[in-house]
Amino acid sequence: MAVTTYIVDKDGNQIDASTATVPANRDFRGAWSLSGSIISEDMAKAKEIFKDKIREVRAPLLEAKDVELMKALEAGTSTTAIATAKDALRDAPAASAIDAATDIAGLKAAWDTSVLGDSPYA
C-alpha cells in the first residue's frame, strides 16, 4: 500500500507532494502559498515569520542587557551603551531592510548580525 504525502499551505489547501513544485528553501514553510501545483512563498507572511524569529532571538539578549543595566546602575557607571544596545534590539523587527525585501534571499540578508548575532538562516 503506497502512502501519499500531502503538502498543506498557509490557507489549509493541500496537494500530493509528488506533484508539487516546491521551493528549495523550507525556512519559511509557514508562508507557503499554493497555486495549482506550484508552491511559492507569501512574502508578507514570510516577513511576519522573520519578525517573530527576531523577537524569539532577542528575548534572552534583552534579559542579559537588563542584568548589565542593573549592575551598571548599582556600580554607578554609565548606562548609555547598554541603553543604545537595548534600543537596537527593540527596533530590530522594524528594520527597513525587512520591509524592502522582495524575495526570501533578501529577507534572510536583512538579519542584523551586529544586533542579533548569528543568523538562524545562514
Image (tube, rainbow, N blue to C red):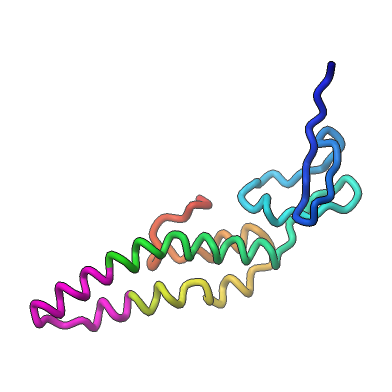
Q: Position of residue 40 (x, y in %)?
A: 77, 54
x then y, percent, for residue 24: 69, 44
Q: Decide if residue 57 is on the left or right side of residue 20.
A: left
Across and down, in percent, residue 20 comes to 83, 40
Q: Residue at x 56, y 73 (%)?
A: 97
Q: Which residues are magenta?
A: 65-85
Magenta highlight: main SS: helix
Residue at the image position 34 percent from the left and 75 percent from the top: 86
User: Quadrant of residue 1 in the image?
Assistant: top right
Q: Is residue 86 left or right of residue 54?
A: left
Q: Can residue 71 be found in the magenta stretch?
A: yes
Between residue 95 and residue 90, name the one nearer to us: 90
**Residue 3 vertical placement versus 17 (above, below):** above
Give coordinates of residue 100: x percent, y percent. Answer: 63, 74
On screen, residue 84 versus residue 93, left or right, reads left
- Please report the residue visible at 77 percent of the width from the left and 51 percent of the height from the top: 9
Residue occupying the point 64% across, 53% down? 28
Q: Is residue 54 above or below residue 10?
A: below
In the rendered structure, does residue 44 fall within the stretch colored magenta?
A: no
Front residue of this view, candidates 90 and 96: 90
